[in-house]
Amino acid sequence: MKEPTYHALKKPSSHRYSWLKCSGAYVQMLNNPGYYNELKNSNMNYPNPSALQIELDLRRTYPKETKERTDELIVPLRNVLCAYVLRNPSGVYCQGMNSIAARLLQCMNEEEAFWTFAQLIEYIFIPLDYYSSLFGVLLDQKVINHLIEKHLPKLAQHLTKMEWSVGVHVVKWLV
């Protein structure tokens, strides 16, 4: 893999190298040749809640694209997400993962996107079960409320006076 020049790093396509190296995906890919293709070519057992959610999210991922372009983009996105669910069957697929994988696919091939995605989810982002028990949602709601009270005290007072809960309305952002 050739290291990009400084000027090339300004282009999204050159982010590929940074993502692969910084996430540890490059090493994982080298240490596990053929693993992604093995997962990709495996059949997912249906009904699988993660597979069903992935199918619902695929078309939502590219709302501004034409139908033809969306159909073209969905195949590698489905491959990456389904392979990840097979890799980590105890983990829970959740909305938003499709957007992460789609962004990675903008600057790298499927296998590179898969390994980068796996590294991000498993080692860099929050634990997979953070939101599955709603503990993470409740904790994040408290953090948001605290930040509003600290940095926007007038807004916090107004919301309290109106008996309006921020937590109820930010759940969609968090899950």
Image (spheres, rainbow, N blue to C red):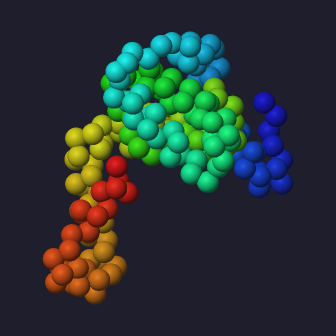
Q: Taking 61 as reference, is 85 left or right?
A: left
**Residue 38 x, y percent position in the rendering:** 56, 12
- Given residues 82 and 120, the one toward you in this image is 82
Residue at the farthest front position: 67
Q: Nearer the viewer, residue 122 or 79?
A: 79
Relative image position of residue 90 (x, y in whole percent): 33, 24
In the image, is residue 101 above or below residue 48? below
Q: Visible in this render: residue 88?
A: yes
Please report the residue visible at 53 percent of the width from the left and 42 percent of the height from the top.
59
Return the residue nearer the eye: 73 or 141.
73
Quadrant in the picture for residue 105: top right
Q: Residue at x 37, y 57 (%)?
A: 173
Q: To which quarter of the image does residue 158 belong?
A: bottom left
Up/down of 50 relative to 170, above or below:
above
- Tell me: 115 left or right of 95: right
- Residue name at image x 56 percent, y 26 percent: 79
Q: Residue drawn 23% across and 79% down?
A: 159
One can see residue 123 in this view:
no
